[in-house]
Amino acid sequence: MDEALKVARLQCPAVVPVHDVGRENDWDYIVSDLIDGPSLAEVIGRKKLSKDAAVKIVAAVANALDYVHSQRLVHRDVKPGNILLNKEGAVYLADFGIAITIARPLNEADSLRGTLVYMSPEQIRGEGHLIDRRTDIYSLGVVLFEMLTGRCPFQGDVTSLPKQILDDAPPRLRTIEASIPVELEAICLKCLEKDPNLRHPTARDLANKLELLLQLGIMKRISELPLTQFLRQWAPEGYRSAKNFDALASLLSSFEDLTG
């Protein structure tokens, strides 16, 4: 109930507004807005989205998560079914039913709550002390992987999936869909690191990288030019000046780290 009250106080355009929380007949309930539109699960079940559309949706969810994390909450069940889109295309993060306060002590059973295919290694292991904002970043990385490739990184049943999530490296996205830019592949795979310390440090950091890809038109790149050469040839005019180009150095260096 403490978490439900915190969710009710969230004020973010990309989080479904909650108007009331309570308990009746030993059941907790949350009263929230009805979003007139499908879930992301319904959308990607009907058609594959463009890379631009996928990146925009994940960047919007990452920004929403950054706000949620700033309020010391972890969603713990980020998946396409909990991402909603209204008729105008606005993105909403929904269903905070198993959200927890960051650093709240969890027993092993509580740590294992979530949706298996989107769960992080620390959730699978029941390591409650490691469940924090980076857990949500892992799950959002699975969502991005699924939108870009048409499948989740790990596939199987309830017996085989946990071992894959714990022990196996996720497939390279470009082995499934060769048109995915190497920078986008690297950003996604960094979300899926087994070690939380190796993931993007914050959801805002993830959003910034994705938004930069969109601003620079990297999804439209059709060659394998080195990134710096591509930027000088194809980036928007405002980024081609020496001053603006140099101003991107700190962000672009992260791409170099990711892609080697």
Image (cartoon, rainbow, N blue to C red):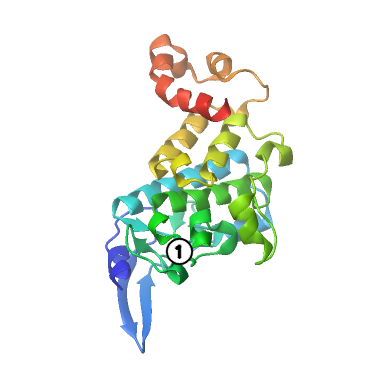
Q: Amino acid at mark 1?
A: Ile
In the picture as drawn, the residue positioned furthest to the bottom comes out as 25
**Which residue is more in the foreground, 36 or 235?**
235
In the picture as drawn, the residue positioned furthest to the top comes out as 242
**Which residue is more in the foreground, 11 or 154?**
154
- Up the image or down, 243 lies above or below 212; here it is above
Q: How far across and down, in percent of the image, does residue 162 sit? A: 61, 60
Total marks placed: 1
Q: Tell me what residue is drawn at x 68 percent, y 22 percent.
A: 223
Q: How far across and down, in percent of the image, does residue 10 sit? A: 30, 59
- Up the image or down, 111 lies above or below 249; here it is below
- Up the image or down, 39 lies above or below 89; here it is below
Name the quadrant of the C terminus: top right
Q: Report whether residue 155 is seen.
A: yes
Q: Which residue is mark 1?
A: 35
Name the quadrant of the N terminus: bottom left
Label 1: which secondary element? loop
Q: Is residue 229 left or right of residue 69?
A: right
Q: Tell me what residue is drawn at x 32 percent, y 82 percent.
A: 23
Q: Is residue 10 left or right of residue 37?
A: left
Q: Report whether residue 248 is seen.
A: no
Q: Is residue 258 left or right of residue 169?
A: left
